[in-house]
Amino acid sequence: MVFTLVITVFYIIFEAIGLLGNLLVITTIFLESRFHVMRYVALASLAVLDFLYLILVPSFRIASMVQGRWPFGEMLCYLNPNFARYFYFNTILHLIVVSYDRYLAIVKSPLTYDGTISTARKVSLVINWIVPIPFFITPILRGRKFHYNPLVFYCEDGLWSSPSSSENTQSDGAKAMLFSIFLIVLPLLVIVFFNWSVYKTAKTHINACKIQVESVSGLEESQQRRQEMIRRKAEGRAAADVNIIVVSFFLCFLPPWICGLLRNFAGSVKFPAEATLITDGCFMVSAFCNPLIYSFRKRDFRASVKSLLRRFGQFGGDRNVIGVNN
């Protein structure tokens, strides 16, 4: 009982921080015209994804933990775990798009890339939201049974709550492995390829600029080389930001993924509910990692957030003054 209470409190804190942080990211990027480039728009789309995830997945589970039952009916019992599947796959696609955008800017087309929101880039973001839909509706169309598991306070397909035979366990384990390879290993390899290429290229460019700056004698030419080096460093820092976002997501996802595999292979062995609740909390952390990364890593983003908060504060103050005068 005490453990459930503590976990519930942490879930509520994660939910509140994630909703507020992602809403702030979305608002800042939407209102600040200098952020209307592909890199930031893709990050804003990722923030929308995290915001919807927090509303449609953990919020129902938190209410279930508080009430000790599932009060939302059979339909949401089907939808809630499938929403989690949809948002995970959508996040993976967003990380691929963000990594590929940095790959274009630094490795493939550094001279022609301008970061503008072209029609093709808009379509790529729309596709990100459409492609995971079959993974969301297929389990429902196939009639998979989802049951409320009172030990973990949410609905699942019953593999844990209903002991299965060894044959079914092996089949479920094989499906879990194929799912992991297709939705985790392969996307991870693609993301690692993009970001490793970006890292090597950015490092090479920075070292080359340093050598050129040291060897140039003319003042004007030296300043141009220094400006070029500053630009390259900014690109390298942006690439490092993407790497941090990707690594933080996978670090948050690995515990629940490992837990899910162990549960599938455990068969009739009872898996600790506490481990599942803790690892699910780790995945919730990924939903507010990005706002924290932006706040610590991006000076221009911090300045824009402060400016936005001041504007909202002044707007609230103006309304109070108007009310007093009236």
Image (spheres, helix red, strand yellow):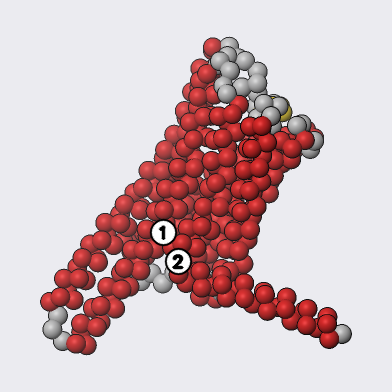
Q: What element carries label 1?
A: helix
Q: Where is residue 300 in the image (x, y as percent from the top left)?
A: 47, 72
* Relative depth, front residue between 40 and 28: 28
**Residue at coordinates 64% horizontally, 77% vertically from top-left?**
311
**Residue at coordinates 58% horizontally, 11% vertically from top-left?**
165
Above/below status of 214 relative to 257: below
Q: Name the residue under label 1.
A: 241
Q: Mark 2 points at which residue?
A: 298
Determine whether, in the image, residue 183 is placed left or right of residue 62: left
Above/below status of 180 relative to 113: above
Q: Position of residue 291 (x, y in %)?
A: 53, 58
Q: Where is residue 74 in the image (x, y as percent from the top left)?
A: 78, 33
**Kind of residue at badge 2:** Lys
Determine whether, in the image, residue 269 is placed left or right of residue 115: right
Quadrant position of the C terminus in the picture:
bottom right
* Relative depth, front residue between 141 and 102: 102
Above/below status of 315 relative to 57: below
Q: Position of residue 208 (x, y in %)?
A: 19, 68
Q: Is residue 142 visible?
A: no
Q: How crowded is mark 1: few (under 14 residues within 10 Å), some or many (20 or more)?
A: some
Considering every residue shown, the one lying at the far front of the view is 2
* Relative depth, front residue between 274 and 5: 5
Which image quadrant is residue 58 in? top right
| In contact (CB < 8 Å): disc 2 and disc 1 | yes
Q: Is residue 23 visible?
A: yes
